[in-house]
Image: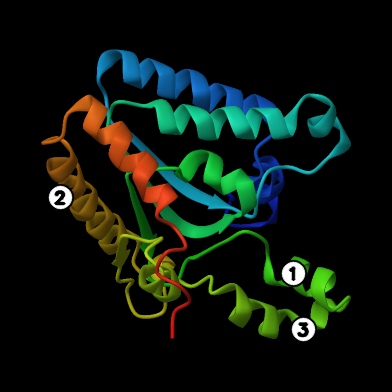
Amino acid sequence: MKKGHDTKTRIARNFGMARPEGYRKAIRLMDLANRFGLPVISLVDTPGAYPGKGAEERGQSEAIARSTEKCLQLKVPLISVIIGEGGSGGAVAFATANRLIMLEHSIYSVISPEGCASILWKDAEKMREAAEALRLTAQDLKNLGICDQIISEPKGGAHRDRKATMKAVGAILGKSLDELDKRSPDGLMKDRRQKFLDMGTKGLAS
């Protein structure tokens, strides 16, 4: 999922927000990978699924649910890397994986801090308090057992040295695939399901 790097590219890519057709395309590709025994790798950078009226009319929530379901059914390795922002069910639909890896400064959350503040306090300005409560950083999520591994970024962020970041991501992916390749198809599916059943058992990070 690409978000874009400037106004023009972000508008062209809908700010990284997928419509129902995007999720259905992902389902077809995951099904194809499963059929041919190919691992699935998703790179996630989205604030969430597109919330427009047209998307809702075409079954946005159903498409997200089926994409998440397809992730859980795969008998091949599924690795997801949060490379910027992973927001709401729109991200979960691509990130219900055996291994969830996050860049050092990426975030992964059920809702944006602004959205959370607007709901809880009716004031988007309280986004800092919301961000703290959400525990959305890679470090917090690692402590909570949601994130499996954190990839260090170059000083100033991943965009400061893209080649070094891509090399680091590639190295972690290679190592993770080597580990997962040792598991049976049924074992991979069971491992993925158990990972999500276990979420929340560690309690809040200190």
Amino acid type at circle 1 is Cys
Q: Nearer the viewer, mark 1 or mark 2?
A: 1
Look at the numbered disc 2 and give the secondary structure of its residue.
helix
Residues marked 1 and 3 touching at CB (< 8 Å): no
Q: Could you say where residue 144 lies in the image, as x and y percent from the top left?
A: 41, 69
Q: Is residue 169 visible?
A: yes
* Distance Cα–Cα, label 1 vs label 3: 9 Å
> How many residues crowd mark 3 within 10 Å: few (<14), some (14–19), many (20+)?
some
> Mark number for residue 183?
none
* Distance Cα–Cα, label 1 vs label 2: 36 Å
Count of marks, rendered view: 3
Q: Could you say where residue 72 lies in the image, as x and y percent from the top left?
A: 43, 33
Looking at the image, residue 161 sits to the left or right of residue 37; the answer is right
User: Nearer the N terminus, badge 3 or badge 2?
Assistant: 3
Looking at the image, residue 82 sits to the left or right of residue 86; the answer is left
Q: Is residue 77 visible?
A: no
**Which residue bears the numbered disc 1?**
116
Looking at the image, residue 39 sits to the left or right of residue 144; the answer is left
* Distance Cα–Cα, label 3 vs label 2: 40 Å
Taking the spot 38% from the left edge, 40% from the top edge, the residue there is 193
Amino acid type at circle 2 is Lys
Amino acid type at circle 3 is Lys
User: Nearer the N terminus, badge 1 or badge 3?
Assistant: 1
> How many residues crowd mark 1 within 10 Å: few (<14), some (14–19), many (20+)?
many
Residue 112: image quadrant is bottom right
User: Nearer the N terminus, badge 1 or badge 2?
Assistant: 1
205, above or below 169, in the image: below
> Mark number for residue 126?
3
